[in-house]
């Protein structure tokens, strides 16, 4: 099957992270089976989603893992010109949710399976779920790869990099902080403890922390923005204008450069809450609390001396390397000991956007790159 047809099939499965990806996994398993390739699921605990591993070629060391996530971000509230899950062309662009991030890469790679019949070193497909909600799916699969597959030479994570080699990215920690105050009539501010106003103080503190990091971090480190960032994305609290709010919750993230340990920031924040904020709250009411939980954690990636970087550069014909701010599964692969490079078709600028698209020229560049990989591993 031609790569565009495979991508069209993949885009047609509505694999938003909150939903099951099993229909897509069924399709890929059948596709591989039809080409004589066995595959194996590594399912989520509740069985609603699954990773998929498949080896094409001989079961020997020295192969390359092609890593891609099957989930996509939601289209809710986005203004799409046409059905996001119907892959379609306008001019020189192919549109559809996931066309760029990252079903384009997966579709191109699958479409080359018929050309993989002379491989002397294997290509391993490693398709994950729940990447977009904190790289939750991949760790179990990476563990199976580490323990059960003949040791690969390295991992290419096909996130959209416009086919440039990316050798570092930031880490992510997603957190939720819950402030419990004490309700009272809003005219009696001396009797209540406002959870909303306490949360505002904490959010403002986090902004100061981020500003400080931005000042302290060398600005020429290759990242944009250069420093570890802290961002509050959602806040909910209170019930009425004239009630001092009893509860307020906010979710926030830390995106750390490889040199910064996010746990230090989390510990500092907890200390600030415990020492600077809670005593004043509890002096008014003993039941007040501030609790912070980690929702998701994906490590930073920094593999500028990766032993497969030269291979990726020669296949793509591009020698420059980049560092990026977004997170991927690359840090998890590197953490498991695999030499890793990020390189895939499409621009990250189009990822997650309404009317997400991949340039036809990027599809072609991805085809050339992966065909060159197949040739290399067949020689
Ligand atoms: Zn992605």
Image (spheres, rainbow, N blue to C red):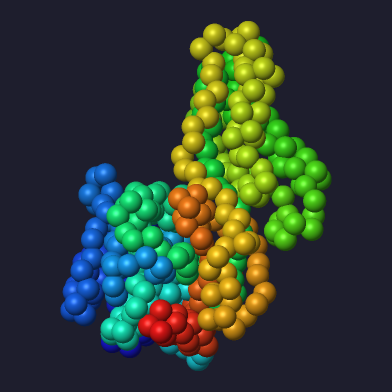
Residue 161 in the image: state x and y as whole percent: 56, 71
Quadrant including the N terminus: bottom left
The image quarter containing residue 269 is: top right
Residue at left offset 41%, top offset 79%: 377
Residue at left offset 61%, top offset 28%: 267
Residue at left offset 50%, top offset 73%: 344
Left or right: 287 as drawn, with respect to 123: right
Residue 277 in the image: state x and y as whole percent: 66, 20
Quadrant including the C terminus: bottom left
Given residues 100 and 32, the one toward you in this image is 32
Q: Can residue 188 be seen in this view?
A: no
Residue 58 in the image: state x and y as whole percent: 28, 72
Q: In this view, does 375 lie above or below 33?
A: below
Q: Can residue 271 be seen in this view?
A: yes
Given residues 66 and 178, the one toward you in this image is 66
Left or right: 186 as drawn, with respect to 219: left
Residue 153 in the image: state x and y as whole percent: 45, 65
Q: How many labels does the image show?
A: 0
Left or right: 146 as drawn, with respect to 279: left
Q: Is residue 14 above or below residue 241?
A: below
Task: Determine the residue located farthest toward the bottom in the rendered image.
Answer: 91
Residue at left offset 65%, top offset 70%: 321
């Amino acid at each position: 099957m031609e790569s565009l047809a495979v991508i069209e099939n993949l885009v047609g499965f509505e694999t938003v992270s909150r939903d099951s990806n099993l229909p897509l996994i069924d399709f890929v398993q059948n596709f591989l089976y039809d080409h004589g390739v066995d595959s194996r699921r590594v399912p989520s605990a509740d069985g609603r989603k699954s990773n998929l591993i498949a080896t094409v070629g001989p079961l020997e060391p020295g192969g390359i893992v092609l890593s891609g996530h099957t989930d996509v971000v939601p289209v809710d509230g986005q203004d799409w010109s046409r059905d996001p899950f119907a892959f379609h062309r306008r001019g020189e662009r192919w549109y559809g949710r996931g066309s760029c991030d990252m079903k384009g890469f997966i579709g191109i790679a699958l479409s080359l399976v018929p050309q993989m019949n002379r491989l002397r070193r294997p290509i391993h497909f490693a398709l994950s779920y729940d990447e977009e909600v904190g790289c939750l799916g991949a760790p179990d699969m990476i563990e199976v790869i580490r323990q059960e597959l003949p040791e690969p030479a390295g991992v290419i994570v096909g996130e959209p990099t416009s086919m440039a080699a990316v050798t570092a990215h930031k880490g992510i920690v997603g957190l939720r902080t819950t402030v419990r105050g004490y309700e009272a009539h809003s005219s009696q501010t001396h009797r209540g403890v406002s959870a909303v106003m306490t949360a505002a103080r904490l959010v403002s503190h986090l902004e100061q922390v981020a500003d400080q990091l931005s000042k302290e971090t060398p600005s020429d480190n290759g990242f944009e923005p250069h420093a570890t960032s802290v961002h509050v994305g959602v806040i909910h609290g209170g019930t009425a204008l004239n009630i001092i709010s009893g509860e307020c919750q906010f979710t926030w993230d830390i995106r750390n450069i490889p040199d910064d340990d996010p746990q230090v920031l989390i510990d500092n924040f907890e200390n600030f809450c415990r020492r600077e904020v809670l005593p004043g709250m509890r002096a008014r009411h003993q039941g007040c609390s501030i609790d912070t939980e980690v929702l998701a954690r994906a490590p930073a990636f920094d593999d500028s001396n990766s032993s497969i970087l030269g291979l990726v550069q020669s296949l793509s014909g591009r020698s420059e390397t980049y560092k990026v701010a977004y997170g991927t599964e690359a840090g998890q692969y590197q953490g498991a000991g695999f030499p890793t490079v990020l390189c895939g078709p499409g621009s990250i600028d189009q990822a997650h956007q309404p009317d997400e698209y991949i340039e036809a020229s990027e599809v072609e560049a991805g085809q050339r790159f992966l065909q060159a990989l197949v040739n290399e591993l067949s020689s």
